[in-house]
Image (cartoon, helix red, strand yellow):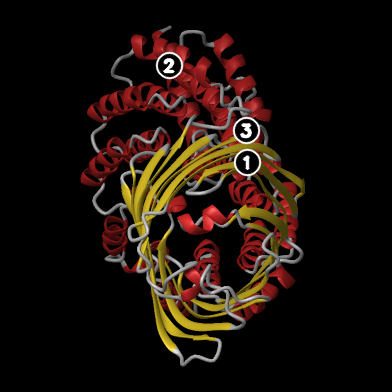
Amino acid sequence: MNTKYTVLFSFLFISLFCFSQNMKEGFTYLETGKYPQAETFFETILKEYPNNKTARLCYGRAIGLNGNSAEAKNIFTKLLNDYANDFEVKLNYGESLLWNNEFNLAKAYYQKLVQEDAKSFPALLGFANTLSNLKAYKEALKYVNKALEVSPGNPNALTSKKYMYLGFAYQKQQLQEYNESEMLLKECLTLFANDKDALLNLANLYLIMGEFEKAEETYLILAKDESNALESLNGLSLVAHLKGKEKKALQISQKAYNLLVGVNDETKKQQTTERYIQALIWNKKYAKAKNLIADLISTQPNENWVLALRATLNTYKSNFKKSLADYDQILVNDSTSFDGNLGKANALKALGKYDEAFASAENILKFYDNQKDAVNFIKELNTTFTPFYEGKASYTFDNGDNEAFSVQNRVEFPFSTKFKLFGNYNYRTTNNTVTNNKATSNDVSAGLEYQLLPTVTFKGTFGIMSAKAQTNDFTQLLADVSLNIKPFKMQTLDIGYKREIQSFNADLLDREIVQNNFYTNYNVSTNFNLGWFTQYFYTSQNDENSRHLLFTSLYYNLLSKPSLKVGVNYQYITFEKQVPTIYFSPSTFNAGEIFLNLIKDEAITKPNEWFYELTAATGLQYIEDQKSQSTYRFQGKLGYKFSDRCLANIFATRSNIASATAAGFTFTEVGVRLKWYLNSKPTFRKN
């Protein structure tokens, strides 16, 4: 009897050993990631041994890892019914929940497994990965560390831990908790020295924070590993661009592009080619960029990254309708595309379609929670339509012994992206220190602005001026009606009528001279930094005089950040009647000047930063048949943005151009200005 059982035991042992040896090939397929072969192998085994637990487990893993996660879960569910207390089966069932993205179910299940065996490495790691997928990174790190205590140095656990740090840091980044995000990434780098993924994430964080020097340092650390040369150079090129150093950005990108010879990694090739074409566009080398994009379009006509490059080129060239068409196609390919949605929002904004621009930007936030670029775009567009108060106080004087003090107040209240109302109240008092002639004026006006079409906007203002002078008190009607038209790309045209009262000094105000101005302004920009502005006024006055005024300016943009341009101005004035003892009214006046203009625009200035503007000009003026006279003009502004809603600045002007005043040649003005947004966003926007 004992001999019989011994023989039976020996037979079973030999059979199991042989069976195990027969499955060794399948185990190798699983271990080396050859899941289709493993699936076929164990399917064959199960035909002969349909109830073998090991074969069933391996078959379930093979098809699950090969992409059929639902079927794998069914197999493990059946195994769990057959082996309810088998811990290995439970572990595989738990893993199938992860494959099927059933993370909440997986969390509850792994909690039970960890309670059942607190030293099980697969249970601890599975639970950690589940928590990571649920973005509970703090708890996930706790359990992955427990897994590493059980299996020190385990590569799978270390890989999971790295990506938990990266995920946790990204989560903090999305919440704009940048310091915490930086701390996590640095901690990750202490555990995984010079890790490529961690360095790239840290560099990107610094870019978002505007810490360009730190981003540059991080990309240079990345470059210490020669295999990361392309990623490093691409990043350094972007940093140079964000710092406004476009030539440097192109030089760096050119170096990376030259390294593509012999590179087989398609991702690196795409990223480097993309950055090189972007750098060409930043440097306005449009012809070369266009040719490279055309080559890509010929072989990859519907690839989103190629379409985005063409859209970017058209945006820089102000071909917004063409760029919009490409962004629409990107969104047909992938409705969640960040580049597609944000690019479309910018194109729509440029085309004057503001409601659609809002919608496109908000669409980004449906897919990318709290995405900074989208949030900033919406914030900037909100500012355009937010009610505000603006006040100015100024003091002026000239060498004709005239002085003036004025206060200007303006309130603007948009009711939609198309319609806004505004009101103005201005107070001005002026006197002559020699004649002691004094005058005071108050004017009140209200108006509206309405966008008739995306390219046509109507603006109308009506009001009254009440004045008290030495010999005359009066009330007069004020008006300013205009159309702002964008007839073609990069062009604007204003056509309008303005009724005003000459009020530069007390003598003029006392004479109650009403001016009816019919005017037009025309501005054209180009893709090669040249611009041209022209203004024409025809003025008829109630003193039976009339005036023609022509001003034109040809300028060239040297820099964009800050804006720096140089140019030449020409001005021509002629009056029908000459009354020099009353006001400056030559039969002919010509003036020419060269100028330099430096601006850091308050609109793009961040809170707690300074903004400024400086204009310096010099030239010659010719008054009728008199000899030429040299001219100068200085205008300056210096301001500070206290918050997104409040800014203030001082300003000053000094000029000796005759047309700048009604009497005398030297004119000086100094003042202060305050602008305060009444709300944090437009009143008509609920979100």
Q: Please tell me which residue is depicted at 35% across the width and 69% down the height of the picture.
A: 399
* Among the 4 quarters of the image, the one containing residue 88: top left
Quadrant for the N terminus in the image: top left
Residue 115 in the image: state x and y as whole percent.
34, 9
Above or below — where is 497 with respect to 527?
Answer: above
Q: Amino acid at mark 3?
A: Ile
Tell me how far mark 3 sits from mark 1, CA to CA: 97 Å
Above or below — where is 628 with respect to 472?
Answer: below
Q: Which label belongs to residue 110?
A: 2
Q: The residue tagged with tag 1: helix, strand or loop?
A: strand
Q: Residues within 10 Å of mark 1 (few under 14, many from 20)?
A: some
Q: Please tell me which residue is depicted at 73% across the width and 50% down the height of the picture.
A: 457
Residue 188 in the image: state x and y as whole percent.
27, 42
Sequence-first disc among 2 and 3: 3
Name the residue carrying label 3: 45
Q: Residues within 10 Å of mark 3 (few under 14, many from 20)?
A: some
Q: Is residue 680 left or right of residue 208?
A: right
Residue 685 in the image: state x and y as whole percent.
61, 29
Q: Is residue 251 left or right of residue 310?
A: left
Callout 3 touching callout 1 (CB < 8 Å): no
Name the residue carrying label 1: 464
Q: The residue tagged with tag 3: helix, strand or loop?
A: helix
* Among the 4 quarters of the image, the one containing residue 362: top right
Pick the front one: 262 or 436:
436
Above or below — where is 407 with respect to 281?
Answer: above
